[in-house]
Amino acid sequence: MINRRSAIRLAGAGTLSAVAGQQLVARAGTAELPQGLALGRGGHGAHTGAGMRTVRPADAGSRPALEKFTLPLPLLRTAKPVTTSGGQDVYLSSIREVTAEVFPGHRVPVYGYFGSWVPPVIRARSGRRTVVIQRNETTVPVSVHLHGGVNRDVFDGQMSRPVRPGGVFSYVYENDQPAAALWLHDHTHHTDAENVYRGMSSPYLLSSPEEDALGLPSGEFEVPLVLRDGDFGSDGGLVFTMDDTEHRSTVLVNGTPWPRMDVKRRKYRFRVINSSAMRFFVLGLSDGTPMTQIGSDASLLEAPVTAPVVVVSPGERADLVVDFSQWATGTEVDVVNYIGPGPMEDVGQVMRFRVGANAPDDSVVPDRLTTLPAVPAATVKRAFTLESSEPGVSPMYGSINGRSFDMSRVDTTVRFGTTEEWTVTNANPTIPHNFHCHLAHMRVVDRSTGPAAPNELGLKDTVQIFPGESIRVRLTFDRYRGVYPYHCHMLDHGAMGMMAQLKVV
């Protein structure tokens, strides 16, 4: 059984190997986690954010006192469109600096979409257009990316098309893709890591009639859980230091540190989004009870996958079902994180469920969830190598195929309508990366360390790549022409240059 003792052992066991990483990728039926796990590293950096802490002061990390699992989990409200005519839903979002009590009694500046640190959820429908009018009320440029969305490049949140302070831009999303948990986040060149860290993100749940017909938990029993982490000073304010995972040891769920959720004895569907800039989460329940994963990034899985741990790297999503009827009323079950870096008593704890009374439950998890197209044959094969500076190396850098990002450069030209096979390699010996491609969803073929895990077999837009490991994916470029980025979605790494651009012609 996975327990606190094994978690502490894992957190202090050193760097993460590719083999250990592959063992971690949510394998069904695994009773124990592999040894030798620890992610991330320290670093230095700073900038932007009017009124916000940007240089790590002496009191950083000395956050205000807070007993874990005392604050209630905020349940995210549903955004209301300003118009719903003409076959589309139109939303108005103000991106602004606001104040929030992340820690009770300490009002501090943060960023927020829809003018809120705890933003609402946009609930869109497959096949029905969504328009989000984003008004930039901050003092910094912004660019909004619908992560996992398949959209024209002008609406993709391009670094070359920032919305200047005081500006307004209407992003048009056709939603011509399967049901999935997507999310909006900043993608401004060089500053997206900090902007997302400070709050520029919000969920975007795309549903469809096919998904509705499955009978999955819904309504109040479908709950978005947006994960992130932070480094806080004694005044309760966020402190941003580039490439510093170790000190971001406060775990936030829906903007709240280590919250508690009261649940009924029935099934719940949790839409987990890792919106942190750098942190991997290896999620499990504190008593080792397996969870059921029904979806990943950009689609449902074809069949449910049951496993005691689910790994989500920055940008990835996991669609999970937990049946609380298997616990007695009054039981407390924690969501734990089995991996560092940071103090295990902090980063190893995520949130707590407190099981309440019985409740009617006619929801089901079918044995068959969807049918995905066969993975197509590839006509073009390419290789990409990700690399960043190792700990202690200065200056910090990131690269793809030895080149740092240049917004004026097209690195890869792709012919419209073709399927390509990409082998993406993590050249670092100690640092994990992941890989995100805009526009085209990925189908995982295999890894250098073994076959794809069962929960990687849906449509993916972000994949984990552990140190020394390679992954093979196939992508079909048959939707739009234009210029789109691909990059490490550990956002600090992307800001350090681990990004490139493709052009579909």
Image (spheres, rainbow, N blue to C red):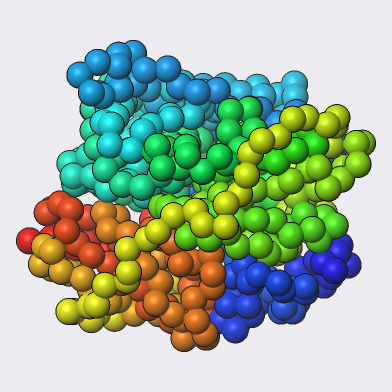
- Identify the residue at the far left of this view: 505
Q: Residue 159, relative to residue 316: is it above or below?
A: above
Q: Quick check: 167 left or right of 67?
A: left
Q: Note whether residue 244 is visible.
A: no
Determine the residue positioned at 27% across, 48% down.
Answer: 150
Q: Residue 389's x, y, as percent?
A: 46, 73
Quarter of the figure that contains the N terminus? bottom right
Q: Is residue 272 above or below residue 117?
A: below
Residue 241 coordinates in the image, percent (x, y): 55, 51
- Residue occupying the point 37% across, 17% down: 81
Q: What's the residue at 11%, 62% (across, down)? A: 416
Q: Quadrant of the C terminus?
A: bottom left
Q: Does any portion of residue 467 appear in the rendered image?
A: yes
Vertical position of residue 29 compared to residue 287: above or below: below
Percent of width and height locating residue 210: 41, 42
* Picture quadrant of residue 493: bottom left
Residue at x 30%, y 22% (from the top left corner): 89
Q: Foreground residue, 245 or 358?
A: 358
- Of residues 226 and 320, which is closer to you in this image? 320
